[in-house]
Image (cartoon, helix red, strand yellow):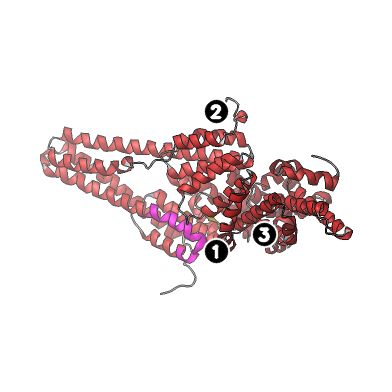
Amino acid sequence: MPAPANPNLFDPPSAHQLADHLAAHPPVRSANWHLRLPIIMIVVLGMTLLLMSSPAFALLPWLALLGAMVYITSRVRAMRELQQRVTRAWELAMIRRYREALGHAWDLLPACRSQPELHGRVVTVIAHILGELNQDNAAEVAYGYLLDRLPTDHPLSLRLKVQRAVAALSAGRLADADEALRKLRGPAEASKDPALGAAYRLARLVQDVRTGHYADAVKTADETADKLRPLGIEAGYGHGLLAYCCDRLAERSTSIDETTRQQLTHQARAWWDKATLLIPPAALVYRYPELRHVTTTTHGTTT
Amino acid sequence: MHEDTPRPFDPAAFDAKLASDSAIRSMLIVGAVIAGVVAFLMPGLGVVSTVVAPVILLGLWLWLTASTARVGRALPLVSGQLASDPAQAEATIEEVLRYRPVMRWARLLTYHRLAALRHLQRRFAETAAICLCLLNQPLKGPAAQARPYLLLMLAEAQLETGNLPGAYHALAHLQQTRLGLAESLQRLALQTRYELAVGAYGSALYRSRAKVELAELMPPAHCATMHAMLATAAHHADQPKLAGWLWERTRLLAEPDLLKQLEQGGFGVGIVEPDTGIGTEPA
């Protein structure tokens, strides 16, 4: 996918395009011969010194050693520049210039082949951006690619699994997501990482919304909201989804009395107010299109 | 003998260590010159000129490189230990500081980790002393990347110890330093804290909307702290509507313990260094 002149015109790749790009540019284990070069040079130098008696010839190994040092320095500088470019792509993603960041990351992938750690970081940036741009199938491919290469006990592994489950939910693969989330329940609840627990909670909330289990979500709404705090501003998405659950329950449930219905409507408004205090309504609806319904029922306007 | 409290930082010992490293380096350079002279100008010495002198020089260079490589391998280990086991990090740093000879950048980065440890332990006076000693040295090569974080730690340590002129100087240097996004966000938080400390509420609120947007990019605890600081500034600047909105957001963002602390005016930012994993949360 060639990068256009205007970075904001970079089109997110499809799942197939991403899979092809990843397959074409896998990380390769470097032979590290450039790291072994000084040792090789020292051995060669030692041998030469033993064999040579002329001072003129003795100069050659020293020049070779100097050359090797210059080469290593230039390699180190090139690697540092590559690291800076990867950091730049990550920073662009952080400030929500997603298409520009995606364009950078896409172009960087081939250059990072010989650095597996940087390669992994670039794929993580790509996966994150694709999730933000609602390209769920492609995001799932990227998360799957990372998970296939990470050791199972890697600290990032659980977070990536949660993200992959969210991508599956958003892509409508509810059965896959349900199985993944069930497997993650134990590790996520036992984890000392509050951000992981929060991400898992949000994933479960999305699952409740997508599968219509509104009552389950409403029953534990306060606890869920507390657990979502480590997400920071992103917790607003959870509040928005809780508003949606209350709203749907109030509107669809036939077994509740009028007082309960009014309470639920009131709760929906309160959750929605909290959500929009953190995240603008347009951003909430962009991420979760079903929330458009809440904007109309709680405030009578569309965003 | 087991010591409960770690040995305090001694600037004289720091200078002595750097001087010792420098002396060994100078000896190597002098040795190289002598070896060169012997090899090229005194061929009559035979095997001494062609083999012994260069081999001795090579041996010294390998000694320096191997010793520095040991430090280089230990530094990421220390970074990991800082968060999980500060006592172990203290022991590792002490051990690493004993290695010699070590290249200058490796020595400086070891002291940088010591500064981060003291910062984590909230021994701010010592943090400031170490940061100042390091910043007074030319930070070149790999050590150059530590400069922004040293300035950030120094600014926070000065704020914590109530040394506002010192904090001002650190922040002024940070303004002149090229920073990445993560560092810029931390500078913003520290600058806002400084402005609150000196009563410059108008400056703290200058371009408040943009500052709120930047705060949203911070880690959750920092984001909540930044909101609370802006809310406090808005309150003092007689902007109750803005203050109310910011406090409402703070209540949604902060964990109960942090919120209690923020409501009492505890705005510890906590410097986080993402690349090395070094960091402290607001406390």
Q: Is residue B12 left or right of residue B241?
A: left
| First along the sequence among labels 3 and 2 | 2
Q: Residue at label 2?
A: A3
Residue under mark 2: which chain is it in?
A: A
Residue B222 visible in the picture: no
| Quadrant housing residue A73 | top left
Q: Which mark is residue A227?
A: 3
Q: Helix or strand or loop: what does disc 2 sit on?
A: loop
Nearer to me, A122 or B221:
A122
Q: Position of residue B229 (x, y in %)?
A: 72, 53
Asked if one can make out residue A15 in the rendered structure from this viewpoint, the answer is yes
Identity of the amino acid at label 1? Gln
Give the labeled residue for mark 1: B121
Q: Main secondary structure of the magenta part?
A: helix
Q: Residues within 10 Å of mark 1 (few under 14, many from 20)?
A: few
Image coordinates of residue A191 in percent, x first then y, are 56, 61
In this rendering, the label closer to the viewer, 3 or 1: 3
Tell me the distance, in whole angstroms, between the alpha carbons under discs 3 and 1.
28 Å
Range shown magenta: B71-88
Q: Report crowding for label 3: few under 14, some 14 to 19, many 20 or more residues within 10 A (C-alpha).
A: many
